[in-house]
Amino acid sequence: MKTFNTAFINGELVTPHGTTVVDLINPTNNEVIGNVTMCDEADTRNAIAAANKAIKTWSQTTKEERLGYLQRLYDALATRMDRLIAATTEEYGAPEARSKGSNELALNIFQHVISVVKDYELEKTLGYSRVVFEPVGVVGIFTPWNSSAGSIHIKMAPALAAGCTVVIKPSEMSAMQTEVLVESYLEAGLPPGVINVVCGLGEVVGKEMSISPDIQRLSFTGSTTIGKMVAKDAMDTVKRVALELSGKNPNIILDDADFEKAIPMAVAACYMNNGQACISASKLLVPKNRIEEVKKLAKAAVEQIKVGDPRDKEVALGPLASVKQYNRVQEYIKSGIAEGAELVIGGEGHPEGLEKGNFIKPTVFAGVTPEMRIFKEEIFGPVLSIVTYETEEEAIQMANDTEYGLNSYVSSANMERAQRVGAQINAGRVLINCIAHDPLAPFGGFKQSGFGREGGILGFEEYLEPKAYITH
């Protein structure tokens, strides 16, 4: 068992002032693999003070100097990727292929930011005024347990490139991954206070960051419920806020699609990251006259999925992150059955032989209607809800029948038709005939999936403030 009892403040590893200790649990077997000392308000204020001091000089560095440091961060983390991947598998439960892919994406964010920022003009003439784009200030970063390194770097890298300093609150459930990241930050040798990492509870560390007058911007990834709380606290000091929140993402299969390909892809789009993804496509909309074919194909696809120890290279679906998450998803499965949905495959309880961990039977429901909880709410687990439609217009209406608007999916043999349908879906992204990620395209939500964008030029501009010099 390992002890995690440091914070990264002002360029140094320090012992937290906080004394609360929480267990770090391996979700594969629910055994304690470590304990994590939580930072408190004093630690958070120290981190904010360090970032506030550092920004006075960091904001004055050249763009080229800052991008040079991003390259050093890339180089330092690249040598630790095997450890980061192993940590993600052990403490989160992601299968090795998923751990590798997600962490390689997190590493490559530094290169993506360098590529889009290197030619960006931080001074422009607009009208007859000189407009200078300055760093917004100290940035508070909140990240979840389901994508630790990626969520940190998609916020941190553009913030540093813009000339901002950062205070990061990672999930306490990601302590092993955080340790590897902090080691790389130390090796990269940025000036003290530019990057600060304080691991602590949201109601303690997160609250202090949200109310601090010395943080000018917050970037939060997590649930809509918590995001609203963060935004309300931030408004007392009129912080700039970006929220990447929950999703209930529709996947429309049009009648001209190749169902042999589209339905297995739909299952994969729902079950990605053990089903614990805000971009998961958990609401599958299919033509009513094809429902029997869809059920058969979906069941066959699920039967090919191996559930088990994420260290097994043949495993595609690992455990959920915690007992709390397991119980949450079980409640949704129970509600689907109680409200009359047809259980195609899966159901309540653990898969046979996997009772010790937080394993879920990969589940598919058919006969789902808009009144059901599994139609309306984000489940955050491997549970697919199949809904039927009779017309294209009805499919679009049901796709938009949600308070969220993060991701959406459309399958069709006709690209023009797919684009037309996608244009009518209220979501930040539309994926057509694919499960893909474009790191240079903006990512973010409509409606209660949040506001603000990450990735590419638009993600970089979130960390800039324009100042106009008028001499006419």
Image (cartoon, grey):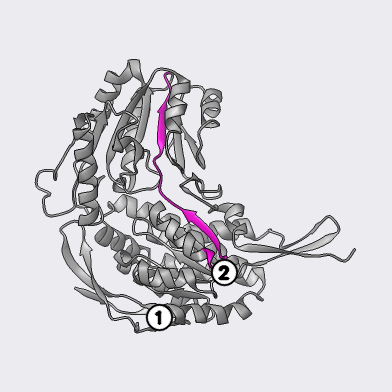
- State the image quarter where residue 339 is shown: top left
Q: Is residue 138 above or below residue 158?
A: below
Frontmost residue, 218 versus 35 = 218
Contact, mark 1 vs mark 2 (Cβ under 8 Å): no
Badge 2 density bin: few <14, some 14–19, many ≥20, Cα 10 Å: many
**Start-end of magenta stretch:** 235-255
Q: Is residue 2 above or below residue 256?
A: below
For residue 187: magenta? no
Q: Is residue 219 left or right of residue 81?
A: right
Frontmost residue, 309 versus 129 = 129
Residue in the image at 38% along x and 27% along y: 285
Q: What residue is pinned by disc 2?
A: 216
**Quadrant location of the N terminus in the rendered image:** bottom left
| Residue 221 in sight here | no
Report how far apart the C-alphas of labels 1 and 2 lie in the structure. 19 Å
Residue in the image at 34% along x and 15% along y: 289
Residue at the right extreme, as displayed: 472
Q: Residue 131, percent across and down?
A: 77, 62
Q: Which mark is residue 43?
A: 1
